[in-house]
Amino acid sequence: MKKETHILHAGRNASENFGIVNPPVYHASTVTFPSVDAMNKAGQNPTEGIYYGRMATPTSQAFEQSVAALEGSDKAIAVQSGLAAITGAILAFVKHGDHILVTDSAYFPTKKFCNTVLKNYGVETTYFDPSIGGNIEKLIKDNTKVIFTESPGSLTFEVQDIPAITKVAKDHGIITMIDNTWAAGYYFNAFEHGCDISIQAATKYIGGHSDVMLGTIALGQDLYKKVKTFVYGLGYCAAPDDCYLAQRGIRTLPARLNVHQENGLKLAGWLKEREEVTKVLHPAFEDCPGHEIWKRDFTGACGLFSVVLDRKFTPTAVAAMLDNLELFPMGYSWGGYESLVIPFDPTGARDASVWSEKGPCLRFHAGQENIDDLINDLEKGFERLNKA
């Protein structure tokens, strides 16, 4: 089956639920067993089946099956947030004295985790330029256990050469992970490009309605038990209602992403023509770093991108523009039906690469509103920017 059909039907079985189309929500902690023998048998392999509410319920399993269908993986694990998916996956493969490589353009909480928690536990992190490609081999040490990628990168949207990186990783027996949230596991197949683990903040496009906190770890059968056992030991688990909402969201993911992509491209194209904008950071645009790689490896784009404004605009002017927007409220996260914007400055967040742009930066999420309404709102914002 094609992916659109597969994710529409994966994880549900009406014949097991009285003909009901959607799997029910199981709120569960205790799972009872009819005999000592049944309890012992279940305990021999607690990562499969239904053993305890924190390990799995039919609700979380249905959602995980849907995510595996989306990502093209053998298995998936649901946890309570995107950051939990990142931290749980990394921690499953490192110990004191180990070393990991992380893209310099990673989601800020990922870098903070590396710089605090991992550092405190004796795990060394080296950040690499997102354009490094196969040259990442020069950074590998004898104790390197994980290469963590994110493509496109957070805020600045550099596209990495994932096949080149994963080839080097496999040659050295290193696990490769990707934060695949931007592509939603739909526009980029991490496993076809050599990754071992694909991570998403299902809070974003999978949920799609800004009402869940959820993370997913998609992976092969060979790694599943190791990672599942580890995140279970950390106490990680996904709430049943969030799993239900995200499973409902995943059914409409292809249709929603089409709207986000269309609005995002139109909005970015309009912004590119504005004299106030000096650069558009969108992988589908030729002047965005890694565009040719994006065109080769990705099948589409979502609604998230950034722009750089002319350096003449002060923080006060930018605030005047943003404070009174009607359809672009300022807020973290993205991937819901609504448009968003945040101002940002990546200057101090780089360790292995240099951010050379001098102007103020804005990250936009193009929601599902009418594109003309979005443009009209921004036109008024630019008027305020220029008058401030």
Image (cartoon, rainbow, N blue to C red):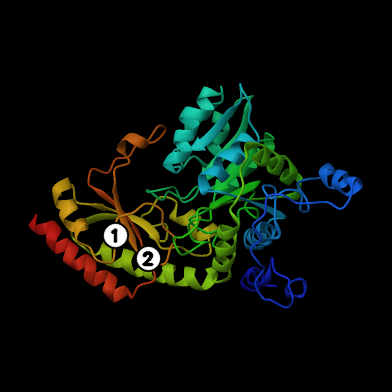
Residue 128 visible in the displayed image: no
- Crowding near the residue tagged with mark 1, few <14, some 14–19, many ≥20 C-alpha atoms within 10 Å: some
Task: From the image, tell me which residue sits under label 2.
Answer: 338
Q: Quadrant of the C terminus?
A: bottom left
Please state if 343 lies on the left or on the right of 15 as rendered: left
Please state if 128 lies on the left or on the right of 280 as rendered: right
- Of residues 263 and 236, which is closer to you in this image? 236
Please state if 110 lies on the left or on the right of 168 as rendered: left
Residue 306 visible in the displayed image: yes
For numbered disc 1, what is the local secondary structure?
loop
User: Residue at position x 66%, y 46% from top?
Assistant: 196
Q: Position of residue 202 (x, y in %)?
A: 53, 56
Q: Position of residue 106 (x, y in %)?
A: 45, 42
Task: From the image, tell me which residue sits under label 1.
Answer: 329
Q: Of the two numbered discs 2 and 1 on the same chain, state the one appearing first in sequence.
A: 1
Instruction: Using the rendered view, name the quadrant where residue 121 is placed.
Output: top right
Q: Quadrant of the N terminus?
A: bottom right
Residue type, numbered disc 2? Glu
Instruction: Kindly indicate whether the residue at mark 1 contacts the one at mark 2 (C-beta within 8 angstroms).
Output: yes
